[in-house]
Amino acid sequence: MRQYSSLGRNLTGYAFISPFIIGFLGFTLIPMFVSLYMSFTSYNLFTSPRWIGLDNYTKMFFDDPKYWNSVKVTFLYVFIGVPLRLIFALFVAMVLNTGSRMIGTYRTLYYLPSIIGGSVAVSIMWRNLFSNEGVINSALTAIGIGPISWFGDPNASLVMLISLSVWQFGSSMLIFLAGLKNIPTEMYEAAGVDGANPIRKFFSITLPLLSPIVLFNMIMQTIGAFMTFVPAYIISKGEGGPMDGTMLYSLYLFRQAFMFNNMGYASAMAWIMLIMIGILTVAVFLTSKYWVFYESEGGK
């Protein structure tokens, strides 16, 4: 009887987790292996896949300058946009780490861009803000700087894209804010008694104690930045222009897959992106031992 009872409990557990298992197998694991196979084939959705070995990877690395341009643009977007977003998020979190009565409202308002920031509507709004007669150019003209051709200069268009990325700082800000709440105020009071100024308190107390949260936010935001698609697609109208200045990796992958029907080539690009993100994540973890400090280390 005990065996039957144990089997019944196990079956009940498997029944509860079966939706996740089915979803994971059907929408994640199996498609991953299918895309890995497709990356070694020539496949255009209309004919059967034809095995071509490493030809897709050879073309990618040696015969496709647009691919390397997308890699360059994406790395600029990630390595400029992610640090700026984290710095801005930490700054706002420190400002909001007060006892104001309206602080709950302020936190909600600052978090809203992260909820709607990746939407098509916000990308269209951002495009209109930076248009020739938009608010940004009007303000720059008023102070004698503009107007700037945001859609004619590849460098300016990438700056426009990065600015939208920085504006979506809400999720990182909330995580930083939670970390700031866990820092004992006694540490700041003791440092103040010793004559430490706000800058010294930030670099000696706040930043070291927040370093695990900085690590988490850095990894999550980096992965998200590599997968950015909607803003680049909407702002450039799907072309990645001007002069491929906003041709992010994900946008170029999309164009190869669904505009040129090169599904095999797009699958190879997807796996290279996965490898790049994996290498960067491992590199960040390996270097974290030099700049991330945990509470348990302080008691040694």
Image (cartoon, grey):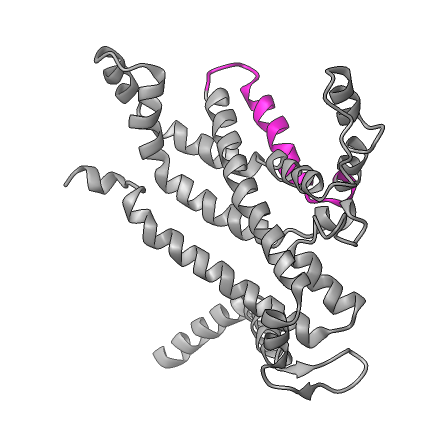
Asked whether 206 or 72 is in front, the reply is: 72
Instruction: Name the residue: 81% across, 50% down.
Output: 237
Asked whether 49 or 149 is in front, the reply is: 149
Q: Does residue 209 appear left or right of residue 242 in this picture?
A: left
Q: Position of residue 240 (x, y in %)?
A: 74, 52
Q: Does residue 165 appear left or right of residue 178 in this picture?
A: right
Residue extent of the magenta highlight: 98-122
- Residue 102 lies in magenta, yes or no? yes
Is residue 117 something one can see in this rendering?
no
Q: Main secondary structure of the magenta part?
A: helix
Instruction: Name the residue: 32% across, 33% down.
Output: 209
Is residue 40 something one can see in this rendering?
yes
Q: Position of residue 213 (x, y in %)?
A: 40, 40
Q: Quadrant of residue 27?
A: bottom right
Q: Position of residue 54 (x, y in %)?
A: 58, 82
Q: Is residue 152 above or below residue 256?
A: above
- Residue 120 lies in magenta, yes or no? yes
